[in-house]
Amino acid sequence: MLSMIRVQDLNAFSGLGNTMDAVVRTYTGKGAKELFALLEERKAEVEQLIRSVKGFVSYTLARSSDGLGGLSMTVCKDKEGTDESVRRAKEWIAQNAGHIGVDAPKVSTGTIIIHAT
């Protein structure tokens, strides 16, 4: 289930306006380990896919400490950007990893309070 909480962006140095949105996709269970092996193998393609989303700010892909899955986090200037990143991720997995049969990710969304780099 997607939820959204609007909060003022406290990063005065972002230059991106008042708010930024984030989406975290967490992959566990069936096929997650295999999916992350494929994502790592094709990381340049995946990065370009997400980087090209309108309003893109940042993207992180991380394997879980147990190596059995992982998460991705996309930050965009607005909700439209994070919604588009979710759509693209789902489409990429269907087209490139459909044979893996990975369980659907847990998707969490929200508005950035602090974005430090």
Image: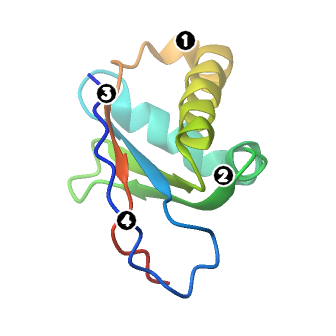
Q: Amino acid at mark 2?
A: Lys
In the image shown, does 14 or 28 lie closer to the viewer?
14
Image position of 3 (left or right of 34)? left
Q: Earlier in the sequence, mark 4 or mark 1?
A: 4
**CA neighbours of label 2 inside 10 A, class few (<14), some (14 to 19), many (20+):** some
The residue at 23%/60% (across/down) is 65
Nearest to N terminus: mark 4 or mark 3: 3
Q: Nearer the viewer, residue 35 or 108?
A: 108
On residue 61, the disc is none
Q: Nearer the viewer, mark 4 or mark 1?
A: 4
Which residue is identified by label 1? Answer: 99
Is 117 situated above or below 108? below
Q: CA distance from mark 4 to mark 1?
A: 42 Å
Q: Secondary structure at mark 1?
A: helix
Give SS at disc 3.
loop
**9 or 94, nearer to the observer:** 9
* Tag 3 residue: 2
Residue 3: x %, y % from top left: 28, 32
Which residue does the numbered mark 2 point to in the structure image?
43
Q: Position of residue 89 (x, y in %)?
A: 58, 31
Q: Position of residue 51 (x, y in %)?
A: 72, 53
